[in-house]
Amino acid sequence: MKNNKTRKISKLKNDSKWAALMLTPNILGFLMFMLIPMVATFALSFTKYDMLRPPKFIGFNNYIKMFKDPIAREVTLNTIIYTVITVPTGMAISLLLAVLLDQKIALKRFYRACYFLPAISSMVVVSIVWQWIYNPEYGILNYFLSLIGINGPKWLQDARTSLVAIAIVGIWKNAGYNMLLFLSGLQGISTSYYEAATLDGASKWQQFKYVTLPLLKPTTFFIFIMSIIGSFQVFDQVMLMTKGGPGRSSSVLVHYLYQNAFQYFDMGYACALAYLLFFLVLILTLFNMRAEKKMGEIY
Amino acid sequence: MMKKKSLVSILTLSMAISLLSGCGGGSAKKNDGSTTGNSANKTTETSDGEVVEITFMGWEASPLETKAVEDGIAEFEKQNPNIKVNYTPAGKGGSDYNAKMIASAAAGSLPDVLFVASDTYRDMVARGAIEDLTDMFDSELSFNDYIESSKQIMEVDGRVYGLHSCTVSPIAYYNKDVFDAAGIKYPSADPADSWTIEEFRDIAKKLTTDDIYGCYGLENVADTLNAQLLSNNGKRYNDDYTKSIINSPENKEVLKIIKEIRTVDKSMPDATTLDSVGMTSKQMLQTGKVAILIDGSWSMQELADTGMNVGIAPMPSYARVTTTGQAHVHSISKTSKHKEEAWKFLKFLAGYDYLGAVCHTGLWMPNRISFYEEENWDKWMNPDIHGEDYKLMLNYFKNAEVDPSALQKTAKGRDIVIEETDMYFKQDQDLNQTLENIDRRINEAIQENLEDMK
């Protein structure tokens, strides 16, 4: 009996060692590329740091500056607007695509691949192509609009439409990926629910509303949270397509952060902006998780 | 269960830490020990410790620019077999290059020799990132041989931290074929007899047809606006550059005229429309879609390379004929371990073998008075590029006024002007409001920067 116990313990120790060994690369990576930079960023946000001279502690000055800075306010608002445009629209489109491509239709795989293509394309390429599409005079988008009698806007070159134009690219880029997630969620729903609903005389719409949507909830929340995080971090297409312009109309938090860090010699302030971004995303995520719990109680 | 979990995590953490320290030790040994893997040291070994490798970083505004730089380096290496120059073009210049420069400075890996853009130079000096070259400069070069705008850029509180590379100025290019087809006389290249803004507007209007825009580039704020403001006796900053004073009647007049050329005369396309066509403004000029292009003198190389029938003329003048001059400096980083070799290279970059050669391609223009003397012309002028018109404009370039952006005391200056004038040119933001905003925002940025430098 005693012998058996020792053997168990030594086996346990042995297992733990293996587990530790296997986990080491991942944890090392996490430490070096996530945790240490995160802590360093937090520490630097309390300093004046231009990356050329040693950082100088200035307490909460960067945060105070942030609350007074009209541009910080403007780019935060732009980021929120971008999120409000992209997340609901993007999710609705992805869900629609997923539902459509979950049917028994010809060339289903081909369509899926097509819709997924933007997700694996480089943002640099995508941005160049969309710049052509958006070109006010020669672009294909305004050409199509002109066919139905609409005089298309200047898209990227107009402060009133630049952010929307950027958001459309964001939606287009991510729709395929989210569609794939929705598809896997849809395929996880057992057909027996639909059979039962059909027997009860539920229409297609009722089936969608009372069977599909509730059972898709975990997937939906996952996509919702990831989309919000992703849209708060939008940067690539802004940098590539408008550089935040005209004026500041399409400048977002990460773009302003980048400018402070690498153009204005103000890494400390950039770090503070990074933490603003972090807290915004954190609050939204916590809020979402709570909402999910509440929703769970309803269903 | 809990215990097992915590045991695992403790073990993992300790292993991770031990591995980390293991890594550190390993690499340290490698660095201390000797030379495996490091190419600089390898070179040293193969040539009995005589060859020193220095790193050099610049930008690639065009492949032609990189080629010009690389040709120069090859010549230097031929003259100095004991020095090898390792050149890296980092980014396209402007903010793109600055980002890479600052990032490598933060990582402690600034190259030995680097381009520093004129509007970043003062920041780099103030933050102690580049070497003071005054003593070496004074003993081996003549400050007075540099043209006025170069001197002003190089000198910071009586010291020199970078050798001014060359000079570049905005000028007017025109497609002679388009002028011929419209039966319009070419503008004079002689500054004494060059076009006024009224004459320019008139010509541009006449050249505009359904297929051709009369002109382009006046709204290109970053490169051409300051020259136009100065030409109208307008100022960007007060004398010691501690205050932005763009909001003046002279400057207002210029901005108003520029916008009218597009909106009233309709002889100029939208500032960004062209670029997104997929054609650069130079290609538009070359293909005759644009008749007159206002652009930096650096475009001479690319335009001459196309073989098009191009002419040059001074900028259209408002109150007086003038243009701005500026260009990056070549500096040695504070962290360089080969300062002697780096200085040797810097001097080479300022001589006929390099500067002369790059000027020969039409990319840069000389910033030394001696280059402009007639007996030295053939050391850098290229008849294929620098025709008779160019010779008429030599004094115009030599006497160019320093671009105020080069001396400004905030790295945000350029972005602020672009952002605000964008709102004026593209969004109909009120002109007074625009200029007030620029002054207010730049002054705030200057104050912040001055406090930061204390």
Image (spheres, coloured by chain):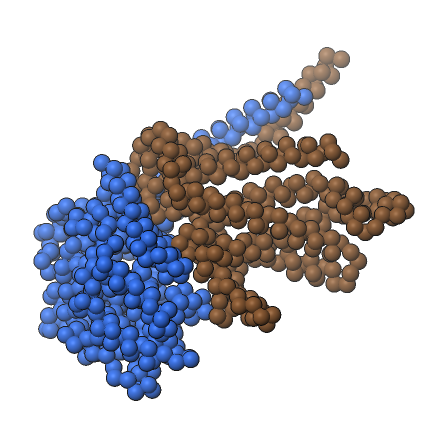
Chain colours: A brown, B blue
Residue at (26, 64) in percent of width and height: B254
Q: Position of residue B177 (x, y in %)?
A: 32, 84
Quarter of the image for the C terminus of chain B: give it: top left
Position of residue B357 in the picture relative to residue B214 (left or right): left
* Rendered position, B310 above or below A241: below
Image location (x, y in percent) of residue A254: 45, 45
Comparing B40 with B114, the one in front is B114
Report the residue at 79% width, 58% height from top: A104
B48 or B357: nearer the eye? Answer: B357
Q: Is residue A124 above or below residue A181?
A: below
At x 34%, y 73%, the residue is B265
Q: What number of labels is visible? A: 0
* Residue A190 visible somewhere in the drawing: yes
Q: Is residue A128 visible?
A: no
> Residue B23 vs residue B136: left or right?
right
Asked where in the image residue B394 lies, by quadrant, the reply is bottom left
Q: Residue at x 54, y 35 (%)?
A: A282
Front residue of B126/B69: it is B126
